Amino acid sequence: MKRIAVIGCGYWGPNFVRIFTNLPESEVKYCCDLSEKRLEQMKLLYPHIHMTTNLDEVAADPEVDGVVVATPVRSHYPVAKKMIEAGKHCLIEKPLCASSAEGEDLLALARKHGVSVMVGHTFLFTAAVNKVKDLLDAGELGEIYYVNSTRVNLGIFQEDINVVWDLAPHDISILNYVFGADPISVSARGRSYIRDGVEDMAFITLEYPEGKMAHVHVSWLDPNKIRRTTFVGSQKMVVYDDVQQLEKIRIFDKGVDKQPHYETFGEFHLAYRFGDIFTPKLDDREPLKAEASHFIETMEGGKSTKATGGEGLTVVRILEAACDSLRKKGALVQLA
Ligand SMILES: NC(=O)c1ccc[n+]([C@@H]2O[C@H](COP(=O)([O-])OP(=O)(O)OC[C@H]3O[C@@H](n4cnc5c(N)ncnc54)[C@H](O)[C@@H]3O)[C@@H](O)[C@H]2O)c1
C-alpha cells in the first residue's frame, strides 16, 4: 500500500485525491493546501484524510511514499524540491516547472535521493493518443507529413503563466510521444489582449526530424472549446477530437498520390483517394487512473516508461524556446 499526499487541492488536485483513494494499491494520507477554505471543503468529502497547510508536516512523515504536486506552476519547484529532499517520489503536474534550470535541478536532486519524478502529461495515458501512436508506429498512415492541433476555449486565465505554458504542454507532449522524437526548431507568434504581457493566444510551429511539421494553436479567447489534432500522412489521415465522447478518433483513407515519374507538366497527374472513414473502438479507462497506476509502479521500482521527469524537462525547454520566439516576433529558435 503506497501512501500519497496531494499538495494543492484547487481545481485539479481533487481528481488525484479521488483516484488514489479508489486505487487498491494506494491511499491518500494528506491533503495539503495553503487555503484553509479548500481544506475544509476537502474534509467534508474525505473525513478520514489528514488536512494540513504545513508542507513540512508532509515532508517529515516517513509513512508518505509519494506526493502529487498540483499547485500553480511557480510553486512546483520549491514544493517538489522539499519533497524530493525528504525522499518522496513526486508526480508533478504539467508543466514540470517554470524553467529548465529548475527542471535540471529537480532531476539531479531526484537522482541523488533515489526517488522517481513523473510529470502530469495526462494525454499520454489516453486510449486515443495511444491508438494514434500505434497507427504511426505500424506505418498505417504512411509517411507523416504534418500535424495541426487546436486547443482553444474561453479561459481559464492562469495567474502565473501565459497560454503557451498552460495549454501547449499537452500538444507538445503528445507530439513528442507519438513521433518518438523531439522538435529541432520552434517559432511562435502570440498576443496579450486581456492582460498586459501575458499572452492569451499563440500560434506555435514546430519542426520535427525527417521534415515533419506541427502547428499548435492555443488560446484562452475562443467562443468554442476545441481539442482537435489532425495527423496527415501519405497513406491515411487521422483526426483526434478529444471533445467527442464516442468518436474521438477517425481514420480517413484519403490522400493524394502523384505519378512516380513525369517529365512535362502535361504528364503530371495527381490521383485523389476518397476511401472509407473508420472509427476504432477505444478503451474507456480514465487516463488519470492509468497515470496514477504508472506512478505507483515507478514508486515500486518499476521503470518509468512515459511522462518521465526527463520528458517534462524537454517540454519545459521547448516552452522556453517558444516564448523566446514569441518575444522575437516569431524568429526561428533552434532546439537541436
Ligand atoms: N493535466 C491536466 O490536464 C491539468 C488540468 C488542470 C490543471 N493542471 C495543472 O495542475 C496544477 C494546478 O492547477 P489548478 O488549475 O488546480 O490550480 P488552482 O489555482 O485551482 O489550485 C491550486 C491550489 O494550490 C494551492 N497552493 C498554492 N500554492 C501552494 C503551496 N505552495 N503549497 C500548497 N498548496 C498551494 C492553492 O491554494 C490552490 O488551492 C497546475 O500545474 C496546472 O497546470 C493540469
Image: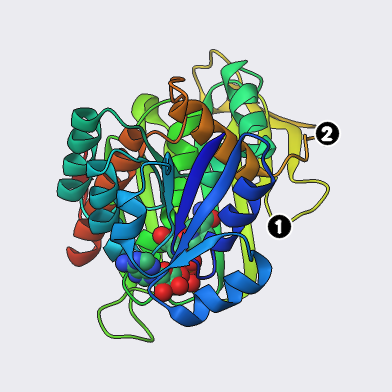
Residue 259 percent coordinates (x, y): 60, 18
Residue 262 percent coordinates (x, y): 53, 16
Say which residue appears at 44% left-offset and 25% top-offset: 304
Q: Is residue 65 above or below residue 98?
A: above
Q: Secondary structure at mark 2?
A: loop
Residue 230 percent coordinates (x, y): 61, 44
Say which residue appears at 52% left-offset and 33% top-offset: 296
Q: Is residue 252 above or below residue 180?
A: below
The answer to which image quadrant residue 196 occupies is: bottom left
Q: Quadrant of the N terminus?
A: top right
Please state if 285 lies on the left or on the right of 83 as rendered. right
Q: Secondary structure at mark 1?
A: loop
For the residue pair 256 and 9, the one nearer the viewer reads as 9
Q: Which mark is residue 243?
A: 1
Which of the four quarters of the rendered structure image does ligand 1 lie in? bottom left
The three-letter amino acid code for the residue at tag 2 is Lys
For the residue pair 63 and 65, the one nearer the viewer reads as 63
Q: Residues within 10 Å of mark 1 (few under 14, many from 20)?
A: few
